Image (cartoon, grey):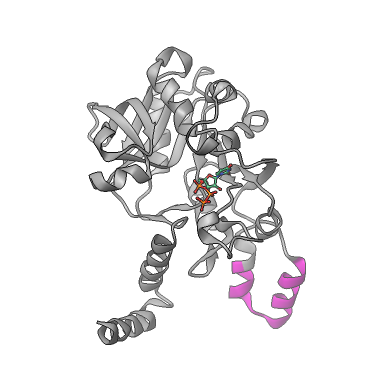
């Protein structure tokens, strides 16, 4: 059960989804379309993410959009022409699919003028979020709905205050691909206290093999820190650099904890992982899975 929400730690209701990155790993597909709109089986990646926020009780969603915001806005808006065409045809199941995305949450949009980094994208949410803790979900990180993570992070934030990040153990040789956290254990097996963070470290310098993945519950003090954060790695304002400051000084915005995630996650911003995500999710689908698995078995047998 949720503890009493005091003014100092109000209930979390807002989710921020940054979707303004250039998506260069997916060019040319992302030349005119945000990578978050690329389909994973038959839904754009970002719809899974909005569904996840809504399932965790966060029904006020702010998307940070970039130069190609139209497809995102259109996807989460009504499409009256298509709806009436499907109504006329009497195709109720497709009509439901069209309406699903516009009924999920109240979605707001704000433009990030220049893609100056994830930290800068999060800072664009400050006027909408105000002075309350909020969640950030990266649109290219899919968490399998069967392994809920965000609910647990919200619970941990309500218990400890401050900020909560999501961590996943990776092989040491993979840690240079992620932000990495230095941690201390706590009484809860799946929760650690975060004492430091470093963006994409060389394996030899990495403080652990806990990688930071794309879910955050942040104290509003992060905005003040981000305003003062200089561009870091890649010339971008890094969210990890601002979080590092919160972790280094609890007086700023409370402690930083990490929830260790052991469930299924798909990094759809990476082409190889994107393909794996589609194959796995398609295999598991009741409607597509049986035929697709049969085809996949014979395809693999031929290829090997
Ligand atoms: P990535 O690091 O994956 O960068 O951003 P990217 O530009 O989207 O993709 P590549 O590396 O060029 O292929 C992580 C998340 O932060 C958002 C992205 O949309 C993605 O969800 N982001 C990144 C912004 O919203 N604004 C930025 O300035 C940078």
Q: Where 49 falls versus 179 (above or below)? A: below
Please determine whether, in this image, residue 82 is positioned above or below residue 110.
Answer: below
From the viewer's perspective, is 130 left or right of 279? right
Does residue 161 appear anywhere in the picture?
A: no
Q: Residue at x 38, y 25 (%)?
A: 256
Q: Main secondary structure of the magenta part?
A: helix
Please tell me whether residue 259 is drawn above or below residue 293 in the rendered image. above
Q: Which residue is nearer to you in this view: 107 or 231? A: 231
Give the camera-side residue of 177 and 85: 177
Identify the residue shown where x is 59% and y is 68%. Answer: 97
Highlighted range, magenta: 80-97
Q: Position of residue 143 (x, y in %)?
A: 41, 52
Residue 299 visible in the displayed image: yes
| Residue nearest the viewer, comparing 132 with 247 | 247
Q: Which quadrant would the N terminus be assigned to in this image?
A: top left
Q: Quadrant of residue 300?
A: bottom left
Q: Residue furthest top?
A: 251
The x and y percentages for residue 157 are 41, 29
Q: Is residue 39 rendered magenta in the image? A: no
Give how far across and how far down residue 142 sits, in percent.
44, 54
In the image: residue 266, left or right of residue 205: right
Q: Residue 166: where, in percent of width, then height?
A: 37, 39
Q: Residue at x 24, y 47 (%)?
A: 171
Instruction: Looking at this view, name the residue that lies furthest to the right.
Output: 81
Q: Is residue 91 magenta?
A: yes
The residue shown at (62%, 34%) is 125
Please identify the quadrant where the C terminus is shown: bottom left
């Amino acid at each position: 059960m949720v503890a009493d929400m005091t003014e100092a730690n109000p209930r979390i209701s807002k989710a921020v989804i940054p979707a303004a990155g250039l998506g260069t790993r997916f060019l040319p597909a992302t030349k005119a379309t945000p990578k978050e709109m690329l389909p994973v089986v038959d839904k754009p990646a970002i719809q899974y993410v909005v569904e996840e926020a809504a399932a965790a009780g966060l029904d006020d969603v702010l998307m940070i959009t970039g130069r190609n915001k139209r497809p995102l806005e259109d996807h989460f808006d009504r499409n009256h022409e298509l709806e009436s065409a499907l109504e006329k045809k009497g195709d109720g199941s497709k009509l439901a699919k069209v309406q699903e995305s516009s009924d999920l949450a109240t979605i707001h949009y704000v433009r990030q003028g220049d893609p100056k980094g994830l930290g800068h994208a999060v800072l664009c949410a400050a006027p909408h979020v105000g002075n309350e803790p909020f969640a950030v979900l990266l649109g290219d990180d899919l968490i399998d709905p069967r392994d809920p993570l965000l609910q647990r992070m919200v619970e941990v934030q309500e218990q400890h205050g401050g900020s909560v990040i999501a961590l996943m153990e990776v092989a040491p040789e993979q840690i240079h691909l992620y932000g990495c956290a230095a941690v201390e254990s706590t009484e809860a097996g799946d929760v650690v206290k975060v004492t430091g963070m470093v963006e994409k470290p060389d394996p030899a310098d990495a403080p652990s093999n806990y990688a930071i993945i794309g879910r955050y519950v942040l104290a509003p003090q992060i905005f003040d820190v981000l305003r003062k954060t200089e561009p870091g790695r890649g010339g971008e304002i890094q969210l990890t650099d601002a979080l590092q400051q919160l972790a280094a000084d609890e007086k700023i915005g409370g402690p930083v904890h990490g929830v260790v995630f052991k469930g299924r996650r798909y990094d759809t911003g990476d082409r190889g992982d994107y393909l794996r995500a589609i194959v796995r999710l398609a295999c598991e689908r009741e409607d597509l899975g049986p035929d697709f698995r049969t085809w996949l078995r014979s395809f693999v047998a031929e290829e090997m």
